Structures are given as C-alpha cells and as structure tokens.
Image (tube, rainbow, N blue to C red):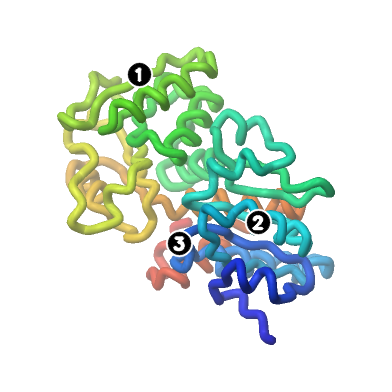
Amino acid sequence: MTIDPSFTYTLDDLRKRSFPGTSLAVVGYPVRHSISPAMHNAAIADLRQRNDRFRDWTYYRFEIAPETLPEALEVFHRKGFLGLNLTIPHKVDVLQLLKGFSDDARRMGAANTLVWGELGYEGFNTDGYGLEQALSKDLGMAIAGTAIVLLGAGGAARAAAVHCLKAGCSSLWVGNRSQQRLAEMMDAIQSLQSKAPVHGFSLVDARLPDLPASGVLVNATSLGLKESDPLPIDPSRLPAGWSVMDMIYNPTETPLIKASQKAGLRAANGLGMLVFQGVRSLEIWSRETVSDHVMMAAACHSLKLPPRYVDNF
C-alpha cells in the first residue's frame, strides 16, 4: 500500500502500516491543517542533495486523540520513528510520558520536539527559538534588553515567557482574561528567578499598563483565527516605538495586525516563528544546518501566498 506524506494518518494506520526508511511526523488533534509535512519534506529534499544519508527520510502527519497519545508514542517508538513534532493539544501532557527532556522543555512545561532513544522519547522545545529568530528576521528586534508584553496564559504563552526571560528581556508583562490561569502562569514563570521584573494584568478591561517608549507585544492567544474575533488589545494604545507580533499565521493578516499597521506600528504574523521552530527541530534530528528559506518557500506555497513573502524572508 502506497504511503503518502501529504495524507493525514491515524493511530490505526500507525498500527497496521509500515513506514519504511527514517520516519518523522507531526502529531496533533486536529492536525489536518498542518503545513509541517510540506515544510519538512522540502527541507529534507534540500538536505538530500548535499548528503545521501537523507535519501530515505520522510515526514508524515498523524491525527492522534489525547486519550490515545500514550499508546501512540509506544507504537511510534516500536516502529522506529526518529522524531516527532507535537502540536495542540499534546505539548504539555506528553511530558509525563517521556524518558527525559531538555531544560527548556522542563521550564516551559511543554515539549514540541521528540527524539528517539533506546528507552523512549526525549523531549525538547523549539518554540522559544522560533519566536526569537522570527522577531529578529521579521521585525529586526532582539529579545535581550527589550520590554515584552505577552498576551495569553496557555502553553504557547508560557514557552514564550520562559524564553524571553532566559534571553534577557528588560521586563515582561503578561495579560490574560482568566485571572486563575494568569495566576498559575505567573507562579510558574516567577519561580525562574529572572532579573527582569515580571507583571501580570487583566485583559478584561482591555487596558494596557504603563509601558516604556519601545518594546514588542506578542499575541499568544487564539483571538484572530476568525475575522469576527475581537482584538485581544487595542494596539493604538501602545507607544509609537512598539512593534507587534501575532503568533497566528493563517490568516496572514489578523485583525490585530491590521489594527497595528493602521496605528503606524510594525507588525508581523507567526509564519516566521513556525518556520524557525521547524528548522530547529529538523536540525536536532539531522544534526545538519537546515535552510530556513527552503522551509519558508514550502510554507508559502502551501498557504498559496504571493512570492513577496518568500522574497522578504
């Protein structure tokens, strides 16, 4: 039976089918929308031109329900899948199923990249790296010495917060609607004992705290996936020296990005972050330098974006 990397496979497929060669996969629920197979297989094809050891590498997509993740990991491991990318909703729950994990994954409380080991999978988190590289590439900004406002208190927000503190941001504000989740988030990141001051604020009244003249606002909420979604915050209230990054990449122009640009602020979506976290994952598995440009071109092709997105990358 033919194996198609663009197909979305299930746990039943994993049990019954053979996946020859060196296999990688993205695992999520739902995951049919993921463009990771296109990105990674394009980058693998590029690696193959330089090194024949990648001739049998293939990256797949698996839709695995949360309650079946423990069994799925056992089958993936038994069938020798070298690496897995985890997306919603598996990044947090997988930690208890791993044989080890990196310091980043432990601090962030989530893993998005798994590597095969004899006794089981080991976990890493490349989301923070993706954010830092995207801020540099898309907005020309470094995290070190920069004030950060982070919207959200979920797994993506926690990973971003931990990385920003580790990378030396000058200060961090975390805003969220649910005060309970905000409190849990603040407890988790304040235990890191960072030198940068960390503050929490409510998004219920849509107010921003007093901010310095420049910095970066990062949206790690899901608000913006739909055109009808309200703004998570009004960017026109940001000082003129601020920039905005929305982690959402589809649609490429969310209401937050449009409002930010209208207010005269530099703004970027999350496509660069997606690409760079993927680049880092493939580098961990391959131990080779991976082309971010090749991955971006494949991502843009999958999303049917105009050439300017690739040309500007």
Q: Where is residue 290 in the image (x, y as percent from the top left)?
A: 67, 56
Q: What element carries label 3?
A: loop
Q: Residue at x 64, y 64 (%)?
A: 43
User: Which residue type does callout 3 highlight?
Assistant: Pro
Q: Where is residue 52 in the image (x, y as percent from the top left)?
A: 83, 70
Q: Residue at x 81, y 46 (%)?
A: 119
Q: Which residue is drawn at 68% across and 35% down?
A: 102
User: Which residue type does callout 2 highlight?
Assistant: Glu
Front-lying residue, 185 or 46: 185
Mark 1 or mark 3, whichever is nearer to me: 3
The quarter of the image holding the N terminus is bottom right
Q: Distance between the residues labelled 1 and 3?
A: 33 Å
On screen, residue 227 above or below 149: below
Mark on residue 199?
1
Q: Is tag 1's residue or tag 3's residue first in the polypeptide sequence?
A: 3
Residue for badge 2: 71
Mark 2 or mark 3, whichever is nearer to me: 2
Q: Where is residue 289 in the image (x, y as percent from the top left)?
A: 71, 53
Q: Is residue 242 left or right of residue 234?
A: right
Quarter location, residue 124: top right
Quarter location, residue 166: top right
- Residue 42 can be seen in this image: no
User: Which residue type does callout 1 highlight?
Assistant: His
Residue count near mark 3 (Cα–Cα under 10 Å), binned few <14, some 14–19, many ≥20: some
Residue for badge 3: 30
